[in-house]
């Protein structure tokens, strides 16, 4: 009997020792921890819980008031949900990645401490030897500092994002203002370039008008001079022509008389006949009979040439003081122009005329003559050392007439072909050309509501084609004067 009691005493003392050891483990654990049984009664409440929650072990062990330590009123804790096996409620929490069957949660408790605390819960089931849940253990770690740091970091992040958004908005606004400034500057630059182009065009037009005015004044001066010279020369030339006619009749009478004297020599005394024969031979009377008519003819031709040159110069340089449009024969104008520039052409090229049957046209003749002169002189300048040809052709094209000036000169390169009508453009050496001849010609043709075209190939020659309307209208005059 005593042996049995002795054996039973150690068996009964073992659970008590284990309970004391477990209680000491709980109390010494630095993490706040409590445990409940299957009836939700607190069986353990360590010192860390007392320190964290402010509830003494004596007040909590043996009660089911553990929820009051966390909340203002009693409510289930995570350990209660594990004991109850409330899968629906547990599904709202996070499973522990370390402890099987354990769950974790984190929440803020304003009733703990002066300003509240953030706690991280981990609750796990307690099982007996058969694996049956007989309670639960729950630990609490104070993560307030971390959450405060996280919140501070989040606020800093939010402030940074807000600042970034604000700065981004400011940069976007500044960028938009910059783009507006750039657009405004581009518009201003475009307007400035357009104004510059307009001023350049206006300056070119003014320069061309000035050159045309200077050219017109020169031609007017030449025309006035030619008119005065023609008036002064025509009278003595008329006298000379008249006197030449009279002199020719006198010479004819003298030659008749000489012929009579020569016929009478046979009946004269020998001494007289011999003297007359010697005198006739010394004077070479037979040669004089042949040469004097030739000299008279050449002199008359020279006087006629002088009269013709003066008249051509007068016709070429004729300026319509009131810019009056008149009907003119283009062929006569071309002939007068060729006569004026013959000294420029005769040593370099043969001039070929291929005139068609064209009507008179209503124009400013002196200006058309100037166009022809510029084209013919340019053609002569384009011909090299080898003698070439300059061909002038005319014809009819509907209500228009056309004039072509073709040469066998050096031609115009492709890169210069589009610029030949630009003011002041020239391929001649400095001092050899102003670059205004073709530009003025282009302006004159445009003024006549015509067109000027050019075909050229380097080394093969150039052909200019001018097309002019036969009739000039008042509308053309009004537009050309604007």
Image: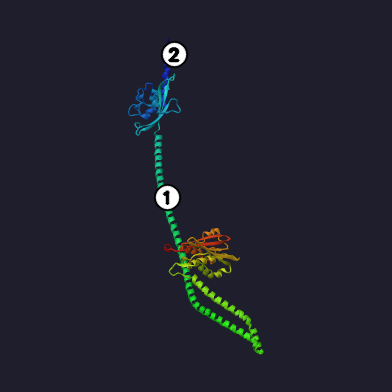
Number of residues whose C-alpha sits closer than 10 Å to that of mark 1, classed few (under 14), some (14–19) or many (20 or more): few
Element assignment for label 2: helix
Q: Position of residue 413 (x, y in %)?
A: 56, 59
- In primary-sequence order, the first of circles 1 and 2 is 2
Mark 1 to mark 2 CA distance (whole Å): 99 Å
Quadrant containing the N terminus is top left
Nearer the observer, 20 or 198: 198
Q: Is residue 150 above or below residue 436?
A: above
Q: Are marks 1 and 2 in contact (CB under 8 Å)?
A: no
Please name the residue shown 43% across and 58% down the image: 195
Q: Name which quarter of the figure residue 455 lies in.
A: bottom right
Label placed on residue 7: 2
Q: Front-most of 199 and 252? A: 252
- Please tell me how many numbered marks the rendered image carries: 2
Q: Which residue is mark 1?
A: 179
Picture quarter with the C terminus: bottom left
Q: Which mark is residue 308?
A: none
């Amino acid at each position: 009997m005593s042996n049995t009691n002795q054996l039973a005493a150690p068996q009964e003392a073992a659970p008590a020792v284990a309970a004391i050891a477990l209680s000491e483990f709980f109390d010494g654990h630095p993490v706040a921890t409590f445990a409940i049984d299957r009836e939700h009664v607190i069986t353990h409440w360590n010192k860390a819980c007392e320190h964290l929650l402010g509830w003494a072990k004596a007040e909590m062990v043996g009660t089911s008031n553990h929820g009051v330590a966390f909340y203002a009123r009693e409510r289930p804790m995570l350990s209660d949900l594990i004991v109850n096996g409330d899968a629906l409620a547990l599904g709202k929490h996070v499973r522990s990645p370390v402890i099987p069957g354990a769950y974790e949660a984190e929440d803020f408790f304003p009733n703990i401490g002066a300003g509240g605390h953030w706690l991280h819960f981990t609750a796990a089931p307690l099982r007996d030897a058969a694996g049956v849940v007989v309670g639960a253990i729950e630990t609490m770690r104070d993560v307030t500092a971390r959450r405060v740091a996280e919140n501070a970091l989040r606020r800093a992040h939010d402030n940074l994002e807000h600042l970034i958004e604000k700065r981004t908005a400011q940069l976007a606004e500044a960028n938009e203002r910059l783009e507006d400034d750039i657009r405004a500057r581009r518009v201003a630059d475009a307007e400035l370039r357009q104004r510059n182009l307009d001023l350049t065009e206006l300056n070119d037009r003014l320069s061309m008008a000035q050159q045309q005015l200077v050219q017109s004044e020169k031609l007017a001066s030449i025309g006035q001079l030619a008119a005065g010279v023609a008036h002064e020369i025509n009278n003595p030339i008329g006298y000379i022509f008249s006197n030449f006619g009279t002199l020719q009749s006198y010479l004819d009478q003298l030659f008749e008389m000489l012929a009579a004297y020569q016929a009478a020599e046979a009946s004269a005394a020998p001494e007289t006949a011999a003297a007359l024969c010697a005198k006739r031979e010394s004077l070479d009377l037979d040669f004089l009979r042949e040469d004097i008519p030739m000299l008279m003819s050449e002199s008359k031709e020279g006087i006629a040439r002088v009269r013709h040159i003066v008249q051509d110069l007068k016709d070429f340089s004729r300026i319509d003081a009131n810019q009056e449009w008149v009907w003119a024969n283009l062929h006569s104008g071309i002939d007068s122009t060729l006569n004026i520039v013959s000294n420029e052409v005769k040593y370099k090229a043969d001039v070929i005329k291929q005139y068609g049957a064209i009507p008179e046209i209503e124009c400013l003749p002196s200006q058309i003559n100037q166009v022809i002169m510029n084209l013919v002189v340019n053609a002569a300048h384009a011909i090299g050392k080898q003698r070439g040809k300059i061909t002038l052709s005319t014809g009819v094209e509907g209500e228009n007439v056309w004039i072509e000036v073709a040469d066998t000169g050096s031609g115009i390169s492709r890169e210069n072909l589009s610029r030949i009508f630009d003011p002041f453009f020239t391929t001649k050496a400095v001092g050899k050309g102003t670059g205004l001849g073709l530009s003025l010609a282009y302006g004159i043709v445009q003024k006549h509501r015509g067109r000027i075209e050019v075909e050229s190939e380097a080394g093969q020659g150039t052909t200019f084609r001018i097309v002019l309307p036969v009739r000039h209208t008042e509308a053309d005059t009004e537009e050309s004067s604007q």
